[in-house]
């Protein structure tokens, strides 16, 4: 009797409806994977033009997935795409979207003030039961959560780019996060097909605390004139077995996002040489050369 009761309670509370805010690189991937695993998803951004662009990129990603999943079965390909898209709704009205959500995942620009302003609004608009999570790469979750009155229902869900392919999810709790919230977030991650790891609310969690200093060290190596970006990339792919070299990865992640991360850390810990700002990175961002998403970063794309 006890087992039957606890199973049904768990089932009752499982996350089913999700609002993802920010339809950029990460938000569109998160929304796609959540929709593909049977969740009802609303993907929100500031303008219709932006969400339309996100919808196109999600469709392209689904096309790549179905071709691989069902190579010679056009009917199965169509069914998969139709099912995923039926679970996905695009919107520019965030306050309405969150009213019927079990979980809100924020994936907007990496800026504490902007994230806090958003969560302040969401806290008033969302039902009491709604869980909040941030996909921040580098900002302490506690600094974002403290603007809300639901710190017990707040956590970090840190995904990796490209979300449909990367198998990891870092699930972060702050001291106030309840066990129930943590378990629901972790179960949601597993329902998306991700392997979850837990990390304390520390700058960069696990992956970025190691990866971002590595990428910025690669830029410093080039700044010193020791080697070219192309040779550094070749070296790390063929000499260390990385799937992408650091400059390919910097362009892939977005140079603006990398700059937000390093600037934020250097403000918090100015003495740490790993977090020192980089002149080349700053110049590229000033010139709006943000990597793959703008067509040029360390490399040119067309
Ligand atoms: N959606 C769907 N399918 C995709 C896709 C996407 N967005 N991107 C690639 N694919 C598919 C391709 O169509 C291809 O399919 P086939 O095998 O049928 O051809 C397959 O995935 C492999 O792609 P590619 O051949 O283009 O390239 P690849 O073999 O090099 O794999 C990769 C691509 C998985 C991205 C790999 O290069 C990789 O792992 N790169 C490193 C990524 C990484 O480190 N990400 C973390 C960044 S840091 C971060 O995200 C955290 C942060 O906070 C900054
Ligand atoms: P992005 O620039 O591709 O997309 C951000 C989107 O948020 C844009 O479409 C923008 O219009 C939208 N936005 C900004 N303010 C908004 C607001 N107030 N309301 C609604 N939408 C708003 O950025 P991204 O790379 O997807 O990064 C998003 C978040 O995910 C950041 O916190 C970043 O640090 C984190 N992250 C990034 C990566 C990566 O590899 N790029 C990986 C993991 C986590």
Image: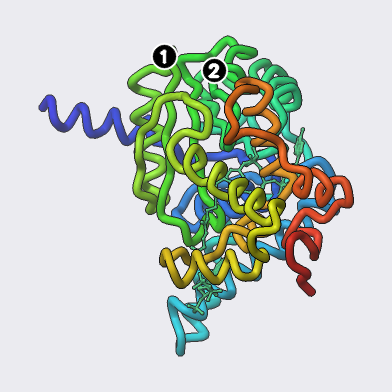
The C terminus lies in quadrant: bottom right
The N terminus lies in quadrant: top left
Vertical relation: 64 (above or below) 269: below
Q: Which residue is mark 2?
A: 142
Q: Which residue is mark 1?
A: 175
Q: Residues within 10 Å of mark 2 (few under 14, many from 20)?
A: some
User: x, y percentage for residue 5?
Assistant: 20, 27
User: x, y percentage for residue 47?
Assistant: 84, 45
Does residue 39 appear left or right of residue 115 in this picture? left
Q: Residues within 10 Å of mark 1 (few under 14, many from 20)?
A: few
> In the picture, residue 149 is in which quadrant?
top right
- The front one of 245 and 182 is 245
- The front one of 122 and 23 is 23
User: x, y percentage for residue 243?
Assistant: 48, 66
Vertical relation: 174 (above or below) 197: above
User: x, y percentage for residue 277?
Assistant: 71, 36
Q: Quadrant of ligand 2?
A: top right
| Residue at 74%, 58% in the rendered image | 291
Contact (Cβ within 8 Å) of mark 2 with mark 1? yes
SS at badge 2: helix
Gap in angstroms between the C-alphas marked 2 and 1: 9 Å
- The front one of 214 and 132 is 214
SS at badge 1: loop
| Residue at 66%, 52% in the rendered image | 219
Does residue 20 appear left or right of residue 260 in this picture? left
Does residue 54 appear left or right of residue 174 in this picture? right
- Residue extending farthest to the top is 149
Q: Which mark is first along the chain, 1 or 2? A: 2
| Residue at 78%, 43% in the rendered image | 279
- Residue extending farthest to the left is 1
């Amino acid at each position: 009797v006890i087992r039957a009761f606890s199973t049904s309670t768990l089932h009752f509370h499982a996350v089913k409806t999700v609002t993802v805010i920010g339809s950029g690189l990460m938000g569109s991937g998160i929304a796609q994977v959540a929709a593909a695993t049977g969740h009802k998803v609303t993907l929100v951004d500031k303008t219709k033009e932006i969400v339309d662009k996100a919808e196109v990129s999600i469709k392209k990603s689904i096309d790549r997935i179905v071709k691989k999943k069902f190579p010679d079965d056009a009917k199965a390909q169509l069914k998969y795409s139709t099912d995923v898209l039926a679970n996905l709704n695009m919107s520019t009205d965030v306050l309405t979207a969150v009213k019927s959500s079990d979980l809100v995942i924020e994936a907007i620009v990496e800026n504490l003030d902007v994230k806090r302003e958003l969560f302040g609004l969401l806290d008033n608009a969302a039902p009491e039961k709604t869980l909040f999570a941030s996909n921040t790469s580098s900002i302490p979750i506690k600094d974002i959560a403290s603007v809300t009155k639901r710190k017990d229902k707040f956590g970090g869900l840190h995904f990796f780019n490209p979300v449909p392919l990367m198998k990891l999810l870092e699930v972060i709790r702050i001291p106030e996060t309840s066990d129930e919230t943590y378990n629901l977030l972790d179960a949601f991650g597993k329902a998306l097909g991700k392997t979850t790891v837990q990390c304390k609310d520390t700058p960069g969690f696990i992956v970025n605390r190691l990866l971002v200093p590595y990428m910025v060290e690669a830029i410093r190596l080039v700044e010193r004139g020791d080697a070219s970006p192309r040779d550094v990339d070749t070296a790390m792919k063929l000499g260390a077995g990385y799937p992408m070299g650091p400059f390919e990865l910097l362009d892939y992640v977005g140079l603006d996002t990398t700059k937000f991360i390093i600037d934020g850390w250097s403000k918090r810990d100015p003495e740490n040489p790993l977090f020192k700002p980089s002149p080349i990175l700053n110049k590229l961002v000033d010139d709006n050369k943000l990597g793959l998403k703008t067509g040029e970063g360390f490399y040119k794309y067309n």
